[in-house]
Image (tube, rainbow, N blue to C red):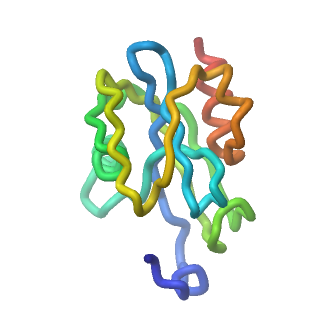
Amino acid sequence: MADQKASHTQVYPEPTVGALIVNKEGKILLTKSHKWFDKYTLPGGHIEVGETMKEAVAREVKEEVGLDLEVAEMLLMQEAIFAKEFWKKKHFIFFDFLCKSKDQQVKLDGRELQEYVWEYPGAAFRLELDSFTRKTLEKYLQRS
């Protein structure tokens, strides 16, 4: 578990990546996280020093949901400054990528994410999404 003091000692915004994963049926993967008060969110996480954003997306997705994917393009950049939807007072910069996966066999890590669902993009708005995931999904639907 992350250090509780981290939110008080954060010096710079943290760049993170998220993956809007589309399978061959056109469904997207949404995951539930305790850190987002059990709202649906995108798998992803921090960019490590020395890796590209695309490398970070592929690594985080493999760690969190066990999928190998093709990172297609960046969809959206968002700032999350002390978002009340997140369990800690943090400043993030989210880089969300459109990704494609042939595989649907999700293997949750059990630490970061607790549940998942494959859902058609339009129908996903019925679910309780965090606001950042909602904006990424809106951007994805606008582009087609």
Q: In this rendering, is residue 121 above or below 10?
A: above
Q: In this rendering, is residue 87 above or below 112?
A: below
Viewer-closest of 19 and 9: 19
Residue 77 x/y as whole percent: 57, 43
Q: Decide if residue 107 is on the left or right side of residue 135.
A: left
Query: What residue appears at the point 47 percent right and 54 percent down from the top-left corner?
Result: 113
Query: What residue appears at the point 27 percent right and 53 percent down from the top-left corner?
Result: 51
Residue 63 x/y as whole percent: 30, 52
Residue 109 x/y as whole percent: 35, 55
Residue 17 x/y as whole percent: 45, 48
Q: Decide if residue 12 is on the left or right side of residue 25.
A: right
Q: Decide if residue 31 is on the left or right side of residue 110.
A: right
Query: What residue appears at the point 58 percent right and 80 percent down from the top-left corner?
Result: 7
- Report which quarter residue 140 is drawn in: top right
Viewer-closest of 124 and 97: 124
Q: Decide if residue 58 is on the left or right side of residue 74.
A: left
- The count of marks equals 0
- Report which quarter residue 105 is drawn in: top left
Q: In this rendering, is residue 135 above or below 138?
A: below
- Report which quarter residue 144 is drawn in: top right
Q: In this rendering, is residue 139 above or below 39?
A: above
Quadrant position of the N terminus in the picture: bottom left
